């Protein structure tokens, strides 16, 4: 019985570290799951599981990061469709919860291109506020909970950003006329 070169024998067949690294590298560079299946001679389910596990690990890692220093942050949103386009959701025989248009908010350090925070929701104030709240919790803070420095946040001008930034990053002083960073 022959085994493929990238599979280790044992109680369970498991990809070796080199092959897992090569598959993830290929996926990150834009190769499809089917292409990885053919090139590395593994099943599509194996590629899917590896991709899902790597994604879960990345999300856990991102969630654990705190006290980040990013003086210039680019905040933007992009959209995708879950199940169907929003206009076609009513046609679905069994619509999924959250089917339709979904917006992904991203905060990226302008210098390193590192994703500081993300949020999935719609393009309205409550979700923009949750996004900025997640971003603020990742940034370096002093002992009193205020930001260690004031980052410059560059956006595409979505009105929800302006209002959310005022709620999360600003507060009115005692007289109510000037604003200061929290």
Image (tube, rainbow, N blue to C red):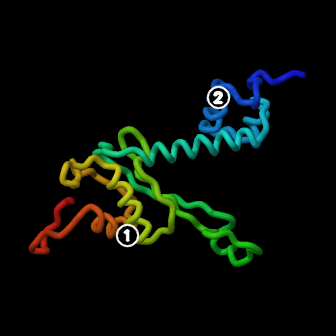
Residue farthest to the right, as pictured? 1
Q: Residues within 10 Å of mark 2 (few under 14, many from 20)?
A: few
Which quadrant is home to the C terminus? bottom left
Residue 128 position, x and y percent, is 41, 65
| Residue under pointer 2 | 22
Please state if 73 lies on the left or on the right of 35 as rendered. Answer: left
**For residue 38, what is the image quadrant?**
top right
Whole-number angstrom distance, CA of label 2 to CA of label 1: 42 Å
At 64% across and 69% down in the image, what residue appears?
99
At 63% across and 63% down in the image, what residue appears?
81
Above or below 114: residue 13? above
Residue 85 position, x and y percent, is 66, 68
At 37% across and 69% down in the image, what residue appears?
159
Please state if 132 lies on the left or on the right of 27 as rendered. Answer: left
At 40% across and 71% down in the image, what residue appears?
125
Residue farthest to the front, as pictured? 11
Q: Secondary structure at mark 1?
A: helix
| Residue under pointer 1 | 159
Instruction: Pick whichever, 160 or 132, lies toward us.
Output: 132
């Amino acid at each position: 019985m022959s085994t493929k070169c990238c599979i280790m024998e044992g109680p369970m067949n498991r990809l070796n570290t080199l092959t897992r690294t090569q598959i993830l590298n290929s996926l990150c560079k834009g190769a499809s799951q089917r292409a990885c299946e053919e090139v590395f001679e593994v099943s599509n389910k194996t590629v899917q599981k590896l991709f899902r596990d790597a994604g879960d690990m990345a999300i856990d890692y991102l969630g654990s990061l705190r006290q980040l220093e990013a003086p210039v942050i680019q905040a933007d949103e992009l959209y995708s469709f879950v199940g169907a386009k929003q206009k076609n959701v009513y046609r679905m025989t069994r619509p999924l919860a959250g089917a339709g248009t979904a917006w992904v908010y991203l905060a990226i350090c302008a210098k390193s291109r590192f994703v500081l925070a993300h949020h999935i929701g719609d393009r309205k104030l409550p979700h923009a506020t949750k996004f900025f709240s997640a971003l603020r919790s990742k940034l370096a803070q002093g002992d009193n909970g205020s930001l260690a420095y004031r980052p410059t946040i560059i956006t595409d001008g979505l009105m929800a950003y302006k209002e959310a930034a005022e709620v999360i990053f600003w507060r009115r002083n005692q007289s109510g006329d000037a604003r200061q960073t929290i």
